[in-house]
């Protein structure tokens, strides 16, 4: 069964700290992996997309890596800010049918 | 990137009634997706809506409860029928360009 797991479920850090969010998936034959941000009660904002052939993607203070052999992806946030507080979701697509399987998310709080 | 508009953004409904949620995309897309996010949970795919054919429902979701329309390539509706408090969730519309998935802002439904 294709599943996505995110650890930790919640994280609280002081402002300015660098942090890593983890995503693991069963079945390494993925098509791509996407990281999203969700603010409370809102929709999803796409942060980074990593294709199966890629090892990492970067956007500003965000860096996402992919290790298919170990079934893992990490989202690295540099110099965290209170505005980064949100839930971060990892989603995996295993084929080109567009169906995404989501992890349960990591709820991040960055304290001023 | 696709811009997705969902209506309504939120609603409070009486049990036993039905609510239709609208999803409008600013470009033509082949597939549209409807997700449910129950309180404190991650996203679960309800169904895939293809223009000109019946929607494809995921396990645990049925057409009588969640009828979907897809009259053209930029619009879809999801109806939540005969609602009960257990249907209180955020419902999200999504489209997938060849690689990246985009989401609307969601409809927060509370059933009382």
Image (tube, grey):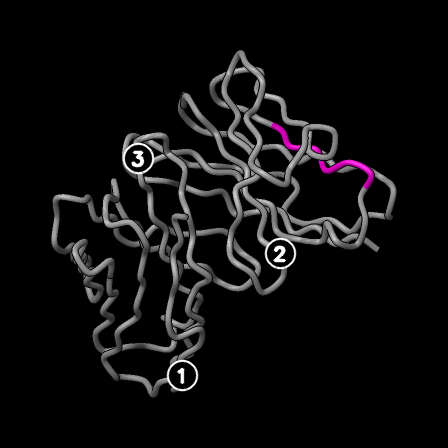
Q: Chain of mark 1?
A: A
Q: Which mark is residue A12?
A: 1
In the figure, A2 relative to B54: above or below?
below
Q: Chain of mark 3?
A: A
Q: Residue at x 12, y 54 (%)?
A: A55
Nearest-to-viewer mark from 2 and 3: 3
Place of residue B106 in the rendered image (x, y in percent of width and height, measured from the top left)? 56, 47
Task: Give the secondary structure at mark 2.
Answer: loop
Place of residue A22 in the rendered image (x, y in percent of width and height, measured from the top left)? 30, 68
Residue B7 versus residue B71: which sits nearer the camera? B71
In the picture of the structure, the residue carrying the numbered disc 3 is A95
In the picture of the structure, the residue carrying the numbered disc 2 is B38
Residue at the far front: name it.
A1
Between discs 1 and 3, the one toward the N terminus: 1
Q: Could you tell me how far apart the alpha carbons at marks 2 and 1 are, in whole angstroms?
A: 23 Å
Q: Do marks 1 and 3 share a chain?
A: yes
**Residue A84 magenta-highlighted:** no
Q: Could you tell me how far apart the alpha carbons at marks 2 and 3 are, in whole angstroms?
A: 26 Å
Location of the C terminus of chain A (image quadrant): bottom left
């Amino acid at each position: 069964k294709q599943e996505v797991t995110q650890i930790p479920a919640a994280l609280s850090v002081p402002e300015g700290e660098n942090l890593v969010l983890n995503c693991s998936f069963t079945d390494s034959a993925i098509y791509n992996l996407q990281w999203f941000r969700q603010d409370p009660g809102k929709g999803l904002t796409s942060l980074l997309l990593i294709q199966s052939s890629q090892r990492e993607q970067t956007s500003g203070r965000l860096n996402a890596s992919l290790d298919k052999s170990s079934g893992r992806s990490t989202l690295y946030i540099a110099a965290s800010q209170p505005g980064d507080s949100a839930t971060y979701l990892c989603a995996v697509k295993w084929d080109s049918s567009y169906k995404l399987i989501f992890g349960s998310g990591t709820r991040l709080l960055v304290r001023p | 990137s696709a811009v997705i508009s969902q209506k309504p953004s939120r609603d409070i409904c009486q049990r036993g009634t039905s609510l239709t949620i609208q999803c409008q995309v600013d470009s033509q897309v082949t597939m549209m997706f409807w997700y449910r996010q129950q309180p404190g949970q991650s996203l679960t795919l309800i169904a895939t809506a293809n223009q000109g054919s019946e929607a494809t429902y995921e396990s645990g979701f049925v057409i009588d409860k969640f009828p979907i329309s897809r009259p053209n390539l930029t619009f879809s509706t999801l109806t939540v029928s005969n609602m009960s408090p257990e249907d209180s969730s955020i419902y999200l519309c999504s489209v997938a360009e060849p690689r990246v998935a985009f989401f609307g802002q969601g409809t927060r439904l509370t059933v009382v």
